[in-house]
Image (cartoon, coloured by chain):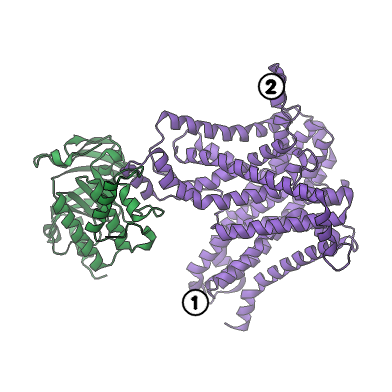
Chain colours: A purple, B green
Amino acid sequence: MTARSAVALWAPGLSVAAGLLLLIGVALGALLSIESGSTAVAPLMGLIRDDYVWAVLRFALVQASLSALLSVGLAIPAARALSRRPDLPGRWVIVRLMGLPMVIPVIVGTFGIIAVYGRGGWVNDGLAALGLPFRIDLYGLQGILIAHVFFNLPFATRILLQGWAGIPAESWRLAEQLGLRGVPLFRQVEWPMLRQVLPGLAGLVFLICFTSFAIVLMVGGGPPNATLEVAIYQALRFDFDLVRVSALSLLQVAVCLAVVLALAAISRPMPVDLGLDRPICRHDGGALHSRVIDALAIGFALLILIPPLLALGIDAAGGPWARTLSDPGLWAAVGRSVSVALASGALALALGLGIILTSRAVKIRLRRRGLAEALESMGIVAFVLPPLVLGAGLFVLLRGVADVFAIGLGLVVVVNALMGLPFVIRIVGPAADRALATQGRLADSLGMAGLSRFRLVDWPVLRRPIGLGLALATALSIGDFSVIALFGTQDTQTLPMLLYRLMGAYRLDQAAIVGLVLITLCLTFFLVIERGVGGRRRD
Amino acid sequence: MVSGGAAVTDRVPVIALEAVRFDYEAMHMRFDLTADAGEMIAVIGPSGAGKSTLLNLIAGFEPALSGTLRLAGRNHTRTAPAARPVTTLFQEMNLFPHLSVGRNVGLGIDPRLRLSAADIEQVAAALARVGLAGKQDRLPGQLSGGERQRAALARSLVRDRPILLLDEPFAALDPPLRRQMVRLVRELQAERTLTVLLVTHQLDELAGMDPRTLFVDDGRITADDRLSHLAAEHPVPAVAGFFASASRPA
């Protein structure tokens, strides 16, 4: 290898990795050095003495475990039912609906949940109309669980559907010929698949719920019902207790790191695939009791999924449209959200491509698979340092040198880009590996290099996954309500933040309209970028 | 449950397909076939012509659109796969990877794996018959490809069904081992008077035999004769072309 080609191979990935490591280093370093100047002693001592911190940790662990158990536990019968009923009327609509919570902003979904289960919501109105004496109280553990199940049950169902689709056709036929039905069929054919998929899936849902922010902030019901993320936000924004911020952040990083390492040890990578679903060959669903079970499983999933979406639409339909839409503040927020999202989507794609271009060459040309995977794992930094930890670190680091609120949106761009990075790497990486493995030698032999090689060889096969990755990263950022809560002010508020403020002021009819605008914006940008960059499907 | 095999006299064909139709994408298939007890029949033809579909129709994995399918003297056009007097061997995945070889074979006796001492002895005897004596506690992953297919054959022995359908089960093995496996199948067939349909792409498996051979093309059986007759100058152009290309050195 010539010196020049070695630089071309290593430069993109190593510069991204160095940048990420520097960011992690300074953020953690800033948190560790709080108050004591240079030692890590003060926050750690603070941690041990602080009962509140331990109460939050205990609640977050319990809440996340129950959320994962319920989401995945309910997804098993739902996915099983969908997988064995390929001819169910409206099945594709149901499967599409299940994909929605991945792109719907968390804060909008939570608004819908409050509209259904909250104090003046559908359920309590219904109970009152029936003359029943009791009401349900959403705020607290039960509210957090409902919201987490709303977002994660459909996600888990779609992942499990892929698991069922991956069971070889021979296994079903063999089982049919041997007369395996009911429990034996489940034990010999379905359970072995579940045993492989469930640990990774449950761990991922646990991690998502353990680092949950907007949901817990909105329906948690106050301290100590919090996640560490929420507690960091409160300690920084309201108490300005930096020692506590530091202690909470270190604890958060420790638990996330432990879960991520455990996941890496037990699970195989799950494909992030938004289109999926191939029918399986089995004919055991005919009996009455299995029809009833399947109907209940699918019905329950839809009962969780649909009412909040419906409630948002109905509340918005009756809202003060003219007053809301004529507010220049709304359009300023739209402009900020879109700019932040486009910037962070582009940054996520640039960082992701930098890592991928080097890691695939390391994997395929140098045959150093382990090294390539280490490089790719830099992409999940947001799992170990969730947004509020990273935001708190940057806040502490920059507060002496700059006006953190003035440059807040820039920080939001960076943090959101890191959250989109895992999706870019998971979606674009495999296609990029394939492109080099199949066409690399031919392109080498023709002497193709540089940009023209990317344009002629890689772009045609990569534009579809690049479109999907960029669309997802951008849509997630438009709807994100996490680190903006730390840095946002009246003058820099984004659309999700405006929505949060309207809800806080009990202007729920206006909030519903803003929520609908936000969802529309998310889906529009998702589809326009996916189609515009990825090109039309050539089927 | 089916027993069937023993009660059937030689006059009633063990397999009888009458105008059995099936559509796969744009291909309209139609099969007519009779086979007697103890027959060994090879099924050849180009890829995607319907060889596997023919076996799947007999096994009940694909439902016939119309026509009549009689197995061991009974109408099985609409019965479930488990109710048919048939055992199938696929190219791979014939064993559940998480169950020991012995339990995989035991599934052929009881799908709930409640095995008596006598059943366990029967499993051991079947494994011994196919040359896997003492390997009942191994997992499929610890066996070679040939041994896995032997274990699947052992399960067909304990199931004791009169029809054995082989869908290229030895295609992944190297040539000497392939011939060895076909010899084992022939022995078992003779011992049990099995009716065997063997789909194959590798005609060397049949070296030293001259079985009745079905040539399947475009969803039909277009030729049905001794292999040697098909391999000689055949009047059907597709058959002649198939053998011309099959005999070319690879």
The residue marked by circle 1 belongs to what chain? A
The residue marked by circle 2 belongs to what chain? A
- As helix, strand or loop, the secondary structure at mark 1 comes to helix
Percent across and percent down for residue B26 are 33, 44
* Vertical side of B204 occupied by A496: above or below: above
Residue at horizontal 28 percent and vertical 67 percent from the top: B174
Q: Look at the image and tell me in which quarter the N terminus of chain B lies.
A: top left
Percent across and percent down for residue A211 are 71, 50
Figure quadrant of residue B133 = bottom left
Which circle, 2 or 1, is nearer the viewer? 2
User: Is B164 left or right of A477, judged from the image as shown?
Assistant: left
Residue A511 in view in this figure: yes
Q: Residue furthest left?
A: B11
Residue type, label 1 = Ser
Q: Mark 2 points at which residue?
A: A126
Residue B176: mark in rendering: none
Residue type, label 2 = Gly
Residue at horizontal 55 percent and vertical 31 percent from the top: A299
* Mark 2 or 1, nearer chain start: 2
The span from disc 2 to disc 1 (Cα, nearest Å) is: 72 Å
